[in-house]
Image (cartoon, coloured by chain):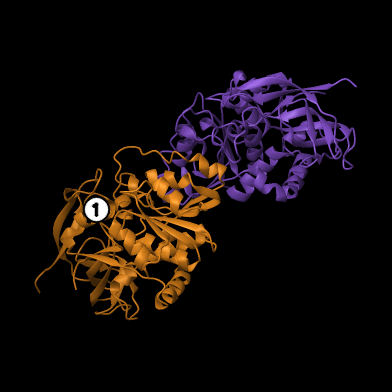
Chain colours: A purple, B orange
Amino acid sequence: MTARINHQWQLAARPVGLIKESDYQWAEVEIPELEDGQVLVRTQYLSLDPANRGWVREGGSYMAPVDIGSVMPAGGIGTVEESRNPNFQAGDLVQGMFGWQEYLVSSGAGLNKLPQVGLPPTAFLGLFGHIGLTAYFGLLDIGQPKEGETLVVSTAAGAVGSIVGQIGKIKGCRVVGITGSEEKCRWIVDELGFDAAINYKTEDVYDALKQHCPDGIDIYFENVGGNILDAVLAQLNNFARIPLCGLISTYNATGPTPGPYNFVNLLTRRVRLQGFIVLDYMPRAQEAIADLTQWYMQGKLKFRVDVIEGLKEAPRAVNKLFEGSNQGKLVLKVSN
Amino acid sequence: MTARINHQWQLAARPVGLIKESDYQWAEVEIPELEDGQVLVRTQYLSLDPANRGWVREGGSYMAPVDIGSVMPAGGIGTVEESRNPNFQAGDLVQGMFGWQEYLVSSGAGLNKLPQVGLPPTAFLGLFGHIGLTAYFGLLDIGQPKEGETLVVSTAAGAVGSIVGQIGKIKGCRVVGITGSEEKCRWIVDELGFDAAINYKTEDVYDALKQHCPDGIDIYFENVGGNILDAVLAQLNNFARIPLCGLISTYNATGPTPGPYNFVNLLTRRVRLQGFIVLDYMPRAQEAIADLTQWYMQGKLKFRVDVIEGLKEAPRAVNKLFEGSNQGKLVLKVSN
């Protein structure tokens, strides 16, 4: 039997600022024969997320930093090609932590078989995966929206933001999204039903919030940090809630980044700000899936997937998240 | 009848940086004859609190800023001298919003008669007043201490901080206090029972926290902001809680003050940070008073009052809070 080859991107250097292709090394390794209990999975789709940048940061983020020389981790979906594990058989569609590589050899731990429910596989990297759960628990558990309240969402045309805004509408909020192009503004208002959109690249965010949030802001679903956070803090109502999901404006910083200048408003306006990571909510995933499925079936939730083709594109593709050039959930298609 | 004279401090200018005596004007006004329903109260003690600085800030804090020309507001305790209100009679000891003045003419609204329970009147400006309630609800409601957790308190020898630490001990926490002199360090450890104290003026706070919090920090009762907040954020455990009670290091700032540089740790460590103002907890005051009284009777809670004599001292005395030269609750004695 000829040796089977696996291509993978290994971390070559800690990125400084935006990820560069030279921070990774394209490697060709041989796939070993499976041992008892192992499965071989062919990668079909990989999830690209802002959190990836934190994983390779010196000092790590919510987990230890990826070691130099290791395969870059990434959530993914693929098909079992060969199995010596009784829980899996060839042809099973599975989800788990795959990494930027064509094949994964796994003990099966952390691999989940996906249900055959007529959804495209990428749905499980988006609305019915960590993205939908992030939006659902961040908004409902921490944001606690009440009918008639005003919800502001940053990165509103992104994977998480676009779902947060739609759930906000389902819960009866006035929803204002902040995003970075006229096209994205039109999409979230015309197709997703947001009440208003702000283009932070062409508008003064403070003034635009003043206009679109005449009753102040009760919930701010935070994905960016920086000036946008300060503009929101200045207009929060008393007892506002801030689910702190991401701070994408700071992830590529090469030096210390100050927190918001209006930090004192968290005190004077009695704000609750709470950081969260979707992994903490996994034990409650079924709650979210049940609601998300129902809303999706009722046509109340739409989602969009932005597909980049080819594993070789991974280091370049992940930067789309920081440039704001993706729309909806960014995924990398590795094989059919 | 000769006219009765009231001396008062009126706000003359918005302070820039520390309060200056010239920001206030010493005024002599005539006390009018009482109308039906009014009471005349002689001020005995006034409460001096860090929040006072926010009240005179351009733009206000949690309430509209004090108008130029108005008497400087302050909580106080005094004795009813004359009453044309059936709910009060001469000799009653009352508490309410008095202002920096010798006499108060009031409709009685917001004036509370104090119980005769053998406590010195100043206890009602401290442990059994807004100070005790701030410590109690901030720590228990927001901090949610669990036995064996590590609690760090800033301004630990101040009015609120000194009570927070003692309640932390009652709840079974390891308690580390941060304060600004060797004498205050000794007081909180030797007399109040804190496990350790850090002198931020002579020690590196980050290193000292590392030493005294070997299991990380679960709760940070925040009164100061600035570098100390950053040192704590760097050592928080996952799912830590931060009751945000004050940011005294920023109250006299004359320009924009950045938030903490380690702000991102609120996200990666899933921290809950919540601002609060004791006024919001007034409907639940009896809960706190019941526990605080019991702990005080059991000898588990001590408090100290730092008394400055003379209304004329008010503008100078309030700065003791920002210089860190008070120990325990700062009050101004206006009359016997």
Q: State left or right for residue A236 relative to residue A159.
A: left
Callout 1, which amino acid? Asn
Q: Position of residue A11 (x, y in %)?
A: 63, 26
Give B156 or A137, whichever is nearer the viewer: B156
Q: Residue at x 31, y 53 (%)?
A: B180
Q: State left or right for residue A276 relative to residue B19.
A: right
Q: Quadrant of the N terminus of chain B?
A: bottom left
Q: Residue at x 70, y 47 (%)?
A: A282
Q: Crowdedness of circle 1 by 10 Å Cα count: few (<14), some, many (20+)?
A: some
Give A53 or A265, whichever is nearer the viewer: A53
Q: To which residue does mark 1 refer? A: B319
Give B284 or B247, whichever is nearer the viewer: B247
Q: Quadrant of the C terminus of chain B?
A: bottom left
Element class at badge 1 = loop
Note whether B112 is above or below A280 in the view shown.
below
- In the rendered image, is residue B170 in sight? yes
Give A205 or B124, whichever is nearer the viewer: B124
Q: State left or right for residue B39 relative to residue A80.
A: left
Q: Position of residue A145 (x, y in %)?
A: 60, 48
The chain under label 1 reads B
Please tell me in which quadrant of the rendered image residue B186 appears: bottom left
Q: Residue at x 31, y 58 (%)?
A: B49
Note whether A133 is above or below A320 in the view shown.
below
